[in-house]
Image (spheres, grey):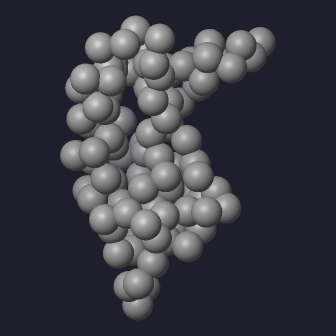
Amino acid sequence: MVELARCPNVVVKLGGLGMDIGVFDHMRRPAPPTSREIADAWKPWIETCIDAFGAERCMFESNFPVDKISTGYAVLWNAFKLMAAGASAAEKTALFSGTARRVYRLP
């Protein structure tokens, strides 16, 4: 990811870690994970990307319905909020809407 971040035209979507092909086992647990459990598990991966690309080149995304196997939609977005808790207001805007708005050329 660090090498890829050297390309200024590359933007990263932060999510999709709940799929059954990854390293996490949330879908095989007897009870669904909480937002805190997801945030704690995913944070090292998410922070690595944000550190490499900067918030202005990252966007949180839900990989639904695929991620539904491991968590609920609201639980996932609450986990993103927990992961972004230490970010500045400008960084949060970029992560939750600004980067997507710019990249997808939304009004």
Q: Position of residue 94 (x, y in %)?
A: 49, 20
In which quadrant will I find the C terminus?
Answer: top right
In this rendering, would 88 be left or right of 19?
Answer: left
Residue under the point 24% across and 26% down: 2
Please report the residue visible at 33 percent of the width from the left and 68 percent of the height from the top.
24
Residue at position x 38%, y 63% in the image: 22
Indicate the quadrant where residue 58 lies. Answer: top left
Above or below, 42 relative to 100: below
**Residue 80 visible in the current orientation:** yes
Displayed quadrant of residue 27:
bottom left
Residue 41 in the image: x percent, y percent?
27, 59
Estimate the x, y position of residue 52 in percent, counting from the top left: 26, 23
Outermost residue on the top side: it is 8
Residue 37 appearing in the image? no
Residue 18, x across and y down, in percent: 46, 62
Marker count (numbered) = 0
In screen coordinates, is 73 left or right of 53? right
Kindly indicate the quadrant of the structure image that contains residue 83: top left
Q: Nearer the viewer, residue 11 or 87?
A: 11
Q: Where 78 sits versus 85, above or below?
A: below
Q: Quadrant of the N terminus?
A: top left
Residue 24 against residue 59 in the figure, above or below? below
Residue at left 45%, top 29%? 12
The extreme bottom residue here reads 30
